[in-house]
Image: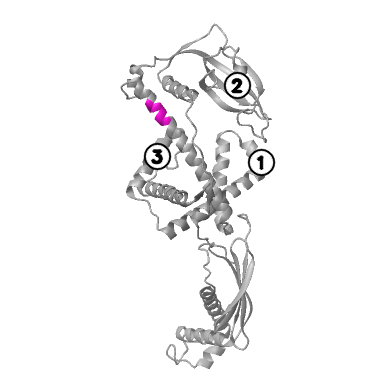
Amino acid sequence: MSNHETEVGSNTVSNDNLTVHVTKKPHCQIKFDITVKPEAVEAAYQKALKAFNKQVNVPGFRKGKAPVQFIAEKYASSIQTECVDIVLQTGFNEALQLTHIHPLKDGQIKRPIVHECSREKGAHFILEFEARPTIPAIQPEELHLSKIESAQITDDERQNALQQVLLQFTTYEPIEDRATQEGDFVDLDVTILEETPRQIISNQRTQVNQSGLPVWMKAKVIGLKAGESAEGETEQNPQAPNPDFQPVPFRVTVNAIWQGKSPAVDDELAKKVGLQTVDELHKKIDERLEQEIQDDVYKQQIHQLENQLVEKYPIDLPHSYIDANKQARLDDYLKQLEERQQGDQAHENYGEIEKMIEESTIRSLQLFFLLRRVAADSQLEPTDEEISQELAKQIALIPSGRSQIDIYSDKQKLREQLYNLALDRKIKQFLLDRATWA
């Protein structure tokens, strides 16, 4: 059953005062069809009458001491209105207790439809509202995950990592008397040739080699002089083919060509990065690459885990939750497109973008509620040490733009962000440790 599906059912419950026919609709919409017995309406009427008797001033009588019949006749309409309000509120509260259904705070509530409310016939009215979602209990052993083998570090990966270190200390001299060659450094502009051309890279320096440029772009750059451009179409990566790939026309412009001079790979280079020997540098590179491999394995495990959770434990979510969260995500996404000068694309594909954001919102909300249910059932809570570790992780991710915290927020908000991230990490690890692996 998908996120968008839910069981639609009905049942009837009753007590001495009323009968409630409950209809459950998709997106946590609840309909109460309530029938109240005449005796309960009579009690509500007497309560309303007594309240009015205490409130009104009748000449010749102290408050609350005027003849009941006089009050009942003189204020009949107002008393009846108050009686209906009491019946509605009392009936609704008793129906909630009987059904164990909880209204959603700030959820949508339709205006009551009152078909009948009299002392002789009793009352009949309908109330429709959004309820809190029902979150199923998770059985970790029901999560069937596939083991993922760790990749081995390759010599190319070691060389590329070392090259990144060297680039930090590389010096450059301009080349003005020839065209671009393999191994040069170039400052590039790249523009996507849509109906309205869109620049996606501006004056970015990169090396003309296998790790610096994709093969199809490198072929266009080689042979260009500073100030020259070439056009072509993107090509997909043959090592990771995508059946949905569509080539995109582009223009690449070489703004400048540079000869890079890198330092020698020796103890002096190691000292520049805070180490003592070149052997320590190679060891540190291997440790970083190994950590990246383990991080990738963990991400794949988490992806499996999340897929299993949303597939095995669907949740019917109220529209109020979906709409509020979707709009915030949609606004943020459209703002990012505008900043990347892709506003026209957003306008043309608004329907697809909105659908994508809604699906992402539903998935995120479902995971949030499921993980919090696990935390509540298993009494999971991050320690101060785990929160501190999360801070270190998030700070390390800031340079890559992948950090999930706002370091400029106030102290309390920052701690809430770190607490939630540390809690999510703890819950997921708890589930991974108890899942069934094959």
**Which portion, as a residue range, is magenta?**
283-288
Q: Nearer the viewer, mark 1 or mark 3?
A: 3
To which residue does mark 3 refer? 393
The amino acid at mark 1 is Asn
SS at circle 3: helix
Residue ID for mark 2: 215
> Is 275 in the magenta?
no
Q: Secondary structure at mark 2?
A: helix
The residue wearing badge 1 is: 349
The mark that comes first in sequence, 1 or 3, is: 1
Pointer 2 with pointer 1, Cβ within 8 A:
no
Residue 206 coordinates in the image, percent (x, y) = 51, 20
Q: Is residue 432 above or below residue 190?
A: below
Q: Is residue 75 visible?
A: no
Front residue of 279 and 317: 279
Q: Quadrant of residue 408?
A: top left
Q: Residue at x 35, y 20 (%)?
A: 278
Estimate how packed mark 1 is, as few (under 14), some (14 to 19) or many (20 or more) residues with alpha carbons within 10 Å: few
